[in-house]
Amino acid sequence: MPRTKTDTSTHALMQGKTELLRGDSASITIIYRNLTGQNPTSPGYMDMMNERLEITIVPAQLSIKEL
């Protein structure tokens, strides 16, 4: 079975200067797009993320930072 190259670079989901999550580029991008309304999400996704991250997420303040 051929090996596939995986993205090992680390990225962070930021709200202003606060780091919310770290992960690979693809995962962080999906979460960012979900939280900013660019991807359709299930009802309650934003509430669930607010609860898990223990912060009020403000979509307009989100960004992705490469680490």
Image (tube, grey):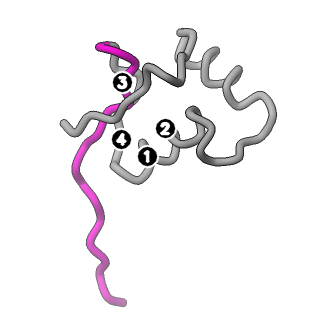
Q: Quadrant of residue 6?
A: bottom left
Q: CA distance from mark 2 to mark 4?
A: 12 Å
Query: Residue 60: image x %, image y %?
Result: 49, 22
* SS assignment for the magenta stretch, majority: loop
Mark 2 and mark 3 lie on one chain; the one further toward the N terminus is: 3
Residue designated by label 4:
23
Describe the element under mark 2 as helix, strand or loop.
Answer: helix
Looking at the image, is mark 3 or mark 1 earlier in the sequence?
3
Q: Quadrant of residue 57?
A: top right
Mark 4 vs 1, N-terminal side: 4
Which residue is denoted by mark 3 in the rendering? 14
Which residue is drawn at the image coordinates 40% and 19% (left, top)?
A: 15
Callout 2 crowding tier (Cα within 10 Å): few <14, some 14–19, many ≥20: many
| First along the sequence among labels 2 and 4 | 4
Residue 16 location in percent, x, y? 35, 15
Q: CA distance from mark 4 to mark 1?
A: 9 Å
Name of the residue lying farthest toward the left = 67
